[in-house]
């Protein structure tokens, strides 16, 4: 292909003029092949995330090889190795936990396959083994949850006892949502986290762990801070079964702003959800095309998100897409 015609073909695909091999393949009409190593289907959020990536790949005309790791890091590592063996153009990884990725990401780099992180970040010795992170600022989400609590309880006095349901141990959102929440409350000693335990981002475990919290602390609990809405929804059931009123006897704070949380807020059972956007598919496809073309990407393609208190839930509900 002559250089000028090739540049025109690249422009038509929305890619900048770079002479990296994958860009040539695309311009020559080869489908971009992406391997997606997803965590699993632990939450409403995750299902929306998977659907978004699948729909965006289809809309872009790319081939998506999808792997559901069922919450096991070893399955994600196996999936990445299989994508490398299949010589995919780009790998998208939603890392279950932050650590343990050094070796496999090095293998992807050695095979010259760009790795895009989505929805969760990693901690590795060599950051050049991944290209960009597409997702949220989890520390900020934790801060927003605490700021809502401070505002909502500003006219009260005395100790505010909080129980916390953490996400998957060692996962980026669990670590950072905790950090951001504590960072804000540090300056306000009357707010005390009296119990904090993982419930793995699932409804079933959210209910189970909340039952244990209620057994141990009973009516002492003033606030539930759950690292995602699914755990909050499970906990709401436990609160009701204990004969207490969620959102009244115990304030309920969740993260994600999924439809289930809006339904709970409209029903008067949940107070607020801090948004975490799962609809990352279109940004991921754009980043994948650029990465395959050898283009430089920003280290972080950050999601823009809000906070939805119960007062706005009914009005906002019709606009929600997940
Ligand atoms: O990584 C994002 C988190 O993972 C979501 O907040 C949670 O619901 C999901 O399981």
Image: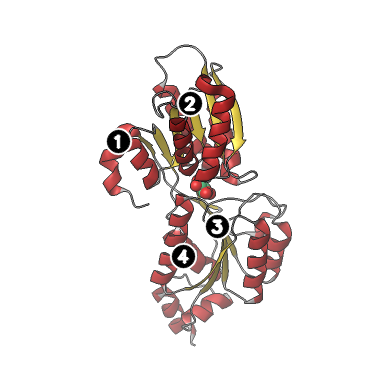
Counting other residues with Cα less than 10 Å from the Cα at mark 4, is it few (<14), some (14-19), or many (20 or more)? many
The span from disc 2 to disc 1 (Cα, nearest Å) is 20 Å
The residue labelled by disc 4 is 285
The residue labelled by disc 1 is 312
Is residue 193 visible in the rendered image? The answer is no
Q: From the viewer's perspective, is residue 213 above or below residue 321?
A: above
Residue 149 spot, x, y in % from top left: 44, 26
The span from disc 1 to disc 3 (Cα, nearest Å) is 31 Å
- Where on the picture, by quarter, is residue 72? bottom right
Residue 286 spot, x, y in % from top left: 45, 64
Residue at left 47%, top 70%?
Answer: 16
Cβ atoms at labels 2 and 4 below 8 Å apart = no
Mark number, residue 40: 3
Front-most of 242 and 181? 242
Front-most of 177 and 209? 209
The span from disc 4 to disc 3 (Cα, nearest Å) is 20 Å
Front-most of 76 and 10? 76
The span from disc 4 to disc 1 (Cα, nearest Å) is 32 Å
Q: What element carries label 2?
A: strand
Residue at left 49%, top 12%?
Answer: 158
Q: Is mark 1 on a helix, strand or loop?
A: helix
Q: Which of marks 4 and 3 is nearer the N terminus?
A: 3
């Amino acid at each position: 292909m002559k250089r000028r015609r090739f540049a025109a073909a690249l422009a038509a695909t929305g890619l900048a003029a770079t002479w990296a091999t994958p860009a040539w393949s695309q311009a020559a009409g080869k489908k971009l092949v992406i391997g997606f190593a997803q965590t699993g289907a632990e939450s409403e959020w995750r299902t929306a995330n998977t659907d978004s990536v699948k729909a965006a790949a289809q809309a872009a005309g790319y081939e998506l090889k999808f792997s559901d790791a069922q919450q096991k890091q070893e399955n994600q590592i196996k999936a990445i190795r299989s994508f490398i063996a299949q010589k995919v153009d780009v790998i998208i990884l939603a890392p279950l936990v932050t650590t343990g990725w050094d070796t496999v990401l090095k293998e992807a780099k050695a095979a010259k396959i760009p790795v895009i992180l989505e929805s969760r970040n990693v901690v590795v010795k060599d950051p050049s083994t991944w290209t960009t992170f597409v997702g949220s600022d989890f520390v900020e989400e934790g801060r927003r949850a605490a700021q809502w609590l401070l505002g909502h309880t500003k006219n009260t006095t005395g100790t505010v006892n909080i129980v916390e349901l953490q996400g998957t141990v060692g996962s980026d959102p669990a670590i950072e949502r905790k950090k951001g929440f504590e960072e804000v409350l540090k300056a306000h000693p009357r707010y005390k986290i009296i119990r904090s335990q993982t419930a793995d981002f699932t409804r079933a475990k959210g209910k189970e762990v909340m039952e244990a919290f209620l057994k141990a602390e009973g009516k002492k609990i003033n606030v539930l801070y759950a690292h995602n809405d699914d755990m909050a929804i499970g906990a709401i059931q436990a609160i009701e079964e204990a004969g207490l009123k969620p959102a009244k006897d115990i304030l309920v704070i969740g993260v994600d702003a999924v439809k289930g949380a809006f339904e709970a807020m409209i029903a008067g059972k949940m107070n607020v959800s801090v948004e975490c956007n799962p609809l990352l598919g279109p940004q991921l496809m754009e980043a994948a095309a650029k990465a395959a073309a050898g283009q430089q990407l920003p280290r972080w393609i950050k999601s823009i998100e809000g906070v939805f208190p119960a007062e706005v839930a009914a009005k906002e509900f019709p606009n929600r897409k997940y």
